[in-house]
Amino acid sequence: MDTSPRDNGSDSNAPGQGSGSDNGFPKSNPGGGRPLGMPAIIMLALAAIALVTIVIREQAGSVAAVSWDEFVREVKAGNVAEVRISGNSLDGQFKAPLAGAGEVGGGAPRTFHIEISPYLGEGLSEMLLEHDVKTTVRQPTDGTGLLLGLYMLVPLLLMGGFWMTLRRARDPLGGSGFLGGFSKSPAKRYGSSDRQVTFADVAGLEQVKEDLKEIVDFLKDPRRFQRLGGRVPKGVLLMGPPGTGKTLLARAVAGEAGVPFFSISGSEFIQMFVGVGASRVRDLFKTAKDASPAILFIDEIDAVGRHRGTGLGGGHDEREQTLNQILSEMDGFSPSEAVIVLAATNRPDVLDPALLRPGRFDRHVTVDRPNHKARLALFRVHTRKVPLAADVNLDRLASGTVGLTGADIRNLVNEAALWATRHDKDAVDSSDFDYARDKVLMGPKREEVLVGREKTMTAYHEAGHALGSWLLPGVDNLHKVTIIPRGRALGVTQLVPEEDRMNIGQSDLENRLVFILAGRAAEKLVFGEYSAGAENDLVQATRLARRMVAHWGMSEKVGPVACHGSNEHPFLGRDVYEQREFSDHTA
């Protein structure tokens, strides 16, 4: 369906394209063990430090602080049993508790501490010797040696615990221990206990299902194909726009064959540790081989399977290692291992050629947008549980939703059901579907109301588009004109094609250009000037004209050549130095 929105300074959004797969009830199988050792070691080290600190403080709390005069009096009274001298500090023990002393921790302590001045210490040794007091002289310390030693012990304990956890692993990134979980494949497994998806759940796509039935037959009876020396493809690549049902098709193949289905996204292979991606690939393929016959599905494989050696650095990065491991594993299948690798992508042009050669993904299946028949089947599938009013015509809905994918149609039906529920209806009628279609294709209504000159200019602009659609041959049929702001547009002229078109001629394309610019021409004719609201029209017209010249060779001046350049970013899978087939003057 074509729309020509009058933009409010921005390009309008294309119809949303979601996932065309049915999530089902996945069962995660990460396979990694829980981290062992490190948390316990850290907690033990902190507990030891806290315990020693408490003990030291408790000991300090049972020491009496006495004055010099009290100390001299107790020495002369014969109540001092032992004295330890360390610099200007003096510690000792009384023979009997000193009642009434200035204790710190309460009670009557036997241990005492006193700080002495150098001039008070004169004659101290003679006095202690005279009264038979055991005396010990030590080198002065700050009293923090034990605590400092404990603090230094903490990093040693941490390093020891880290070493112990690595020892528990099979290799530096092994399958157990602290880092073992990283190397395990996070693929989800769908088995017989999960809800099975079959080809009956996939509406439309009849030709695609026929192509995939051969894979199902091989998984059911591999010997039938091996009897005459035949070889079933190791890999099948599903290509198509987002939301067309590639993941659902892969699950349907597994459901039809009744074999385990392992699903993983290409981005899940890459992690922060070097070598994790390759290790996960090895684990994934090993798990699939152990469950043979099985299907291994890699969604968005372009995240890991892009052209190698195309970045500016040219290094052997983690993504390339992962891709190399995938290639190696696919070459390592034996004829007795009935494992089929399915992959999905919407960017087949950026995949590495080694991935697409015969013997790997040697069968390519295109999952395109549904035609009228497929859209009608999709509407029937998605409205099975939706009560419909008598005025709902699914064939008319299928005709008016050209270009929508299966995910878009599912979203449209859901929006219609929500809108009917909001208005307390018992069934979903045609007005609800009309509202949902306008919301999906043109965006939700905005609260702004156009007034004055702005409203008049928008009306003439959309009237220009409407006249163009009526008068120009080859332009799709006019369906709806509105000047109610929707999405980013101030007004929209909506067209509905009579039928699905697979090709279009130059004259129809030129009329299409006239239709796109008709709204801008109406502004100039009536108001004598252009407005900024035609921005999206200019974007569409420029894009179409460039494709006519650079892609389809419809310019007599340039000639029948393909002179379009690559818009690929060098980091996204294309060469940095790409040869240009046209000069700057031609561009």
Image: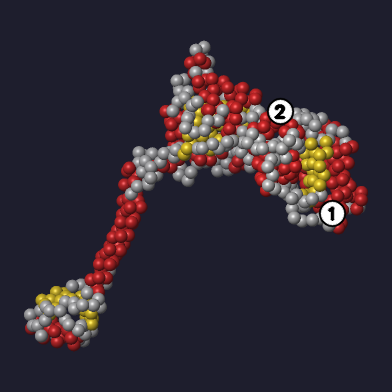
Quadrant that contains the C terminus: top right
Furthest residue in direction front, as rendered: 426
- The crowd level at tag 2 (other Cα within 10 Å; few <14, some 14-19, many 20+) is some
Instruction: Name the quadrant containing residue 128.
Output: bottom left
Kindly identify the amino acid type of the residue bearing the numbered disc 1: Lys
Instruction: Name the quadrant containing residue 463.
Output: top right
Q: Nearer the viewer, residue 494 or 509?
A: 494
Task: Give left or right: position of 6 versus 89.
Answer: right
Instruction: Name the quadrant containing residue 301.
Output: top right
Q: Residue 232: image x %, image y %?
A: 53, 20
Q: Residue 206: image x %, image y %?
A: 65, 25
Question: Which residue is located at x 18 percent, y 77 percent?
Answer: 109
- Measure how far apart labels 1 and 2 are at the Cα level: 40 Å
Quadrant that contains the N terminus: top right
Q: Which mark is residue 373?
A: 2
Q: Which mark is residue 455?
A: 1
Q: Residue 307: image x %, image y %?
A: 58, 35
Q: Residue 503: image x %, image y %?
A: 77, 29
Q: Point out the tag, 1 or 2, that comes first from the N-terminus.
A: 2
- The crowd level at tag 1 (other Cα within 10 Å; few <14, some 14-19, many 20+) is some
Label 1 sits on a secondary structure element that is: helix
Label 2 sits on a secondary structure element that is: helix
